[in-house]
Image (cartoon, rainbow, N blue to C red):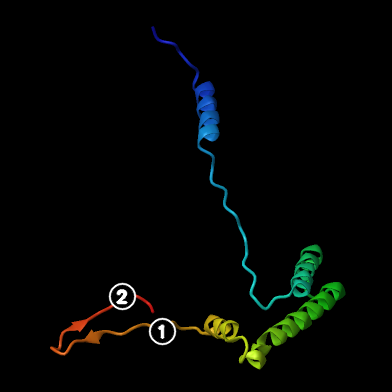
Amino acid sequence: MYVKIDAPVWNMAEHDSLRLYFPLRKSHKRRHKVPWMTYKAIKLVSHKHKLYKKYKSARHPAYAKAAREATREVRRAKRNFEKLSENIDTDRKSFYAYVRSRSRTKEVIGSLTDDSGITTVLHSIA
């Protein structure tokens, strides 16, 4: 005995059961902020973006004022964060972590040569 089932009903039932037993993976868009951005700087930059969306012009006086304030605060925050070199004697780890983050190249271990002259090539980054 065969039961005839309408295709749309079957697809809806299949879709509901798949969603029930196999939840979809949600993508989280989460931006990682740079370490030197302060809360105040982030707020001023987001305010600048909101004003641009509102007026759609970089020449509007409100946007220009917000852009100046945001730029000033971002520069101040970066300048204050880069004073890590003042306390290098007590906090070396954060200073060198910052220096490594600012470098544009990664150090790679080169090939090694044995006493017999055989060269081995390593493909890993130090």
Looking at the image, which is closer to me, 10 or 54? 10
Q: Quadrant of residue 31?
A: bottom right
Percent of width and height locating residue 32: 62, 67
Task: Return the residue at label 2.
Answer: 123
Lateral position of residue 51 relative to residue 34, left or right: right
How many marks the image carries: the answer is 2
Q: Amino acid at mark 1?
A: Glu
Q: Residues within 10 Å of mark 2 (few under 14, many from 20)?
A: few
- Quadrant of the image for the N terminus? top left
Residue beneath the point at 63% across and 88% down: 90
- Name the residue nearer the viewer: 2 or 85: 85
Residue furthest toward the top? 1
The structure residue drawn at horizontal position 55% and vertical position 83%, both measured from the top left corner, is 102
Q: Is residue 104 left or right of residue 76?
A: left
x and y, in percent, of residue 111 in the image: 26, 84
Q: What residue is rendered at 67% in x and 78% in y?
A: 36
Q: Which mark is residue 2?
A: none
- Outermost right residue: 61
Task: Say which quarter of the image contains residue 82.
Answer: bottom right
Label 1: few (<14), some (14–19) or many (≥20) C-alpha neighbours in 10 Å: few
Specify the quadrant of the image occupied by residue 80.
bottom right
Secondary structure of residue under mark 1: loop
Task: Give the x, y percent position of residue 54.
Answer: 81, 63
- In depth, the one of 31 and 54 nearer the eye is 31
Separation of residues labelled 1 and 2 (CA atoms): 12 Å
**Which is more N-terminal, label 2 or label 1?**
1
Left-right relation of 90 to 38: left
Q: Which residue was labeled with disc 1?
A: 107
Which quadrant holds the C terminus? bottom left
